[in-house]
Image (cartoon, rainbow, N blue to C red):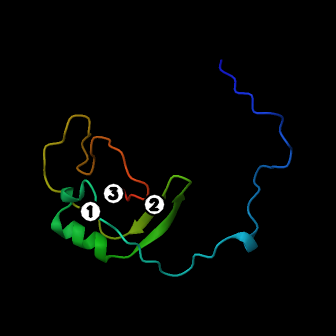
Amino acid sequence: NDLLPIGVPSGKGRAGASLPMALRQSLGGEVYLRVVPGLYYERLTEFAATSFFSESWTVGSEADRIGYRFKGGRALTFQPREQPFGAGSDPSNIVDSCYPIGSIQV
């Protein structure tokens, strides 16, 4: 077993604590995101690419410190191709690669 000494708990934190409402940023209303097509943009059909950029999306409840899930829009369609080894059977799958900070994964 590896142990990492981190000190004695201060006792100041408590489970379920949250930031007071007065300190939270209000994010109501519409926001427009600037998006630059990325590494696998060519995998989308022309219709899917047009739909992706023209439809409204809403931030869903599935969110954490890693990312947000967007709801809405039409199901995306992809260019037909033979799946590369390790990509799985879904046409949206790719073999894992690095994603830039702020990227949108579809």
Q: Relative to 50, is 20 on the left or the right?
A: right
Amino acid type at mark 2: Arg
Judge the density around disc 2: few (<14), some (14-19), many (≥20) Cα neighbours within 10 Å: some
Residue depth check, mark 3 versus mark 1: number of the one nearer the observer: 3
The relative height of residue 82 versus residue 63 in the rendered view (above or below) is above
User: Which residue is label 1 attached to?
Assistant: 76
Identify the image quadrant of residue 6.
top right
Amino acid type at mark 1: Leu
**What residue lies at 86% left-to-right and 44% top-to-bottom?**
11
Total numbered labels placed on residues in the image: 3
Amino acid type at mark 3: Val
Of labels 2 and 3, earlier in sequence is: 2
Q: Relative to 27, is 94 on the left or the right?
A: left
Q: Nearer the viewer, residue 23 or 90?
A: 23
Q: Which mark is on residue 4?
A: none
Q: Which mark is on residue 69?
A: 2
Q: Relative to 33, is 37 on the left or the right?
A: left
Judge the density around disc 3: few (<14), some (14-19), many (≥20) Cα neighbours within 10 Å: few
Q: Which mark is on residue 106?
A: 3
Instruction: Using the numbered discs, state the Cα–Cα distance from disc 2 to disc 3 in whole angstroms.
Output: 10 Å
Q: Relative to 19, is 65 on the left or the right?
A: left
Outermost residue on the right side: it is: 11
